[in-house]
Image (spheres, helix red, strand yellow):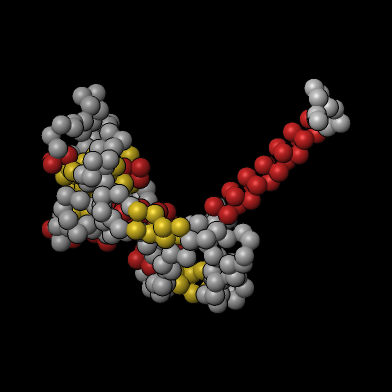
């Protein structure tokens, strides 16, 4: 029989607690390492296009997630691969070598102008409504009275040339902030309506105009458009951001040269 205290009289409880914590911690690290490989893995060689071996330790078993609002299911890892042909040439044969866009670099979709192949559906709010919409569809929102309303202002590119006129603002209903300026490029450029991310724009109150350093005035007519005049899809958002981001390097040939 075991009487009071005899069961643990030769056991170091602190030592047991330390080992239990150590085993738990290593298990936690192993679990997190596996879960971190659900997106962006397995890695793909940028020279051969081959996938690295998934192995038997660090890669988790595929898990299927049901997306909200009837958007289907997605299984990760090993989701659909990006099979697009990219408009670029490599400057060297080794992995990780710099690339140079072919054709018009502003339309190549590589480097700072690259974009992810996201789902071609609008991002939505918790109740399933399109998240980013023009203000004309929701009169509840308005520009603060102490701010300059950019509607009607001319948009100028990095070269000081006009690229269009702001016709509306697009509001993020989940965050209650403006995401885009809707710009009409004018009859000379086919009167296209393009979206300008507000983070790329400076609203100059003194001169009452909108200034954009990322691209030239004539390049607004080249910006990606939306399929719907009142919605923007996730894929379109990435393409739009990639276009203006690419302009930071490719808008003029001199931007790709060294500073000295």
The N terminus sits in image quarter: top right
Identified at 15% across, 61% down, the residue is 190
Identified at 30% across, 49% down, the residue is 68
Task: Give whichever of 79, 218 is nearer the camera.
Answer: 79
- Residue 162 visible? The answer is no
* Residue 135, percent from left and from top: 17, 39
Identified at 20% across, 51% down, the residue is 231
Identified at 54% across, 75% down, the residue is 50
Image mark count = 0
Residue 192 falls in which quadrant of the image? Answer: bottom left
The C terminus sits in image quarter: bottom right
Vertical position of residue 97 compared to residue 224: above or below: below
- As drawn, is 4 to the left or to the right of 220? right
Residue 199 falls in which quadrant of the image? Answer: top left
- As drawn, is 148 to the left or to the right of 75? left
- Residue 234 visible? The answer is yes
Vertical position of residue 108 compared to residue 63: above or below: below
* Residue 155, percent from left and from top: 25, 46
View extreme (front): residue: 1
- As drawn, is 240 to the left or to the right of 182? right
- As drawn, is 11 to the left or to the right of 79? right
* Residue 213, percent from left and from top: 37, 48
* Residue 109, percent from left and from top: 39, 64
Residue 253 falls in which quadrant of the image? Answer: bottom left
Task: Give whichever of 145, 248 is nearer the camera.
Answer: 145
Vertical position of residue 53 compared to residue 231: above or below: below
């Amino acid at each position: 029989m075991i009487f009071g205290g005899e069961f643990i009289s030769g056991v170091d409880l602190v030592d047991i607690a330390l080992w239990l914590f150590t085993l738990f911690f290593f298990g936690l690290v192993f679990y997190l390492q596996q879960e971190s490989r659900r997106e962006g893995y397995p890695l793909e060689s940028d020279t051969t296009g081959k996938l690295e071996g998934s192995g038997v330790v660090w890669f988790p078993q595929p898990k299927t997630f049901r997306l909200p609002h009837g958007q289907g299911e997605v299984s990760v890892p090993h989701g659909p691969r990006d099979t697009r042909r990219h408009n670029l040439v490599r400057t060297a044969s080794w992995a990780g070598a710099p690339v140079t866009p072919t054709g018009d670099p502003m339309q190549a979709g590589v480097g700072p102008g690259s974009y992810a192949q996201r789902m071609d559906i609008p991002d939505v709010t918790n109740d399933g409504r399109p998240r980013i919409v023009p203000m004309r569809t929701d009169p509840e929102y308005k520009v603060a009275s102490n701010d300059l309303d950019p509607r009607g202002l001319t948009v100028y590119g990095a070269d000081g040339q006009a690229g269009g006129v702001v016709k509306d603002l697009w509001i993020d209903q989940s965050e209650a902030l403006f995401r885009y300026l809707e710009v009409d490029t004018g009859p000379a450029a086919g009167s296209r309506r393009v979206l300008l991310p507000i983070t790329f724009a400076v609203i100059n109150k003194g001169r009452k105009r909108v200034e954009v350093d990322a691209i030239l005035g004539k390049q607004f007519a080249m910006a990606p458009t939306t399929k719907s005049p009142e919605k923007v899809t996730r894929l379109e958002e990435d393409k739009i951001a990639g276009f203006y981001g690419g302009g930071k390097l490719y808008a003029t040939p001199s931007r790709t040269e060294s500073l000295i």
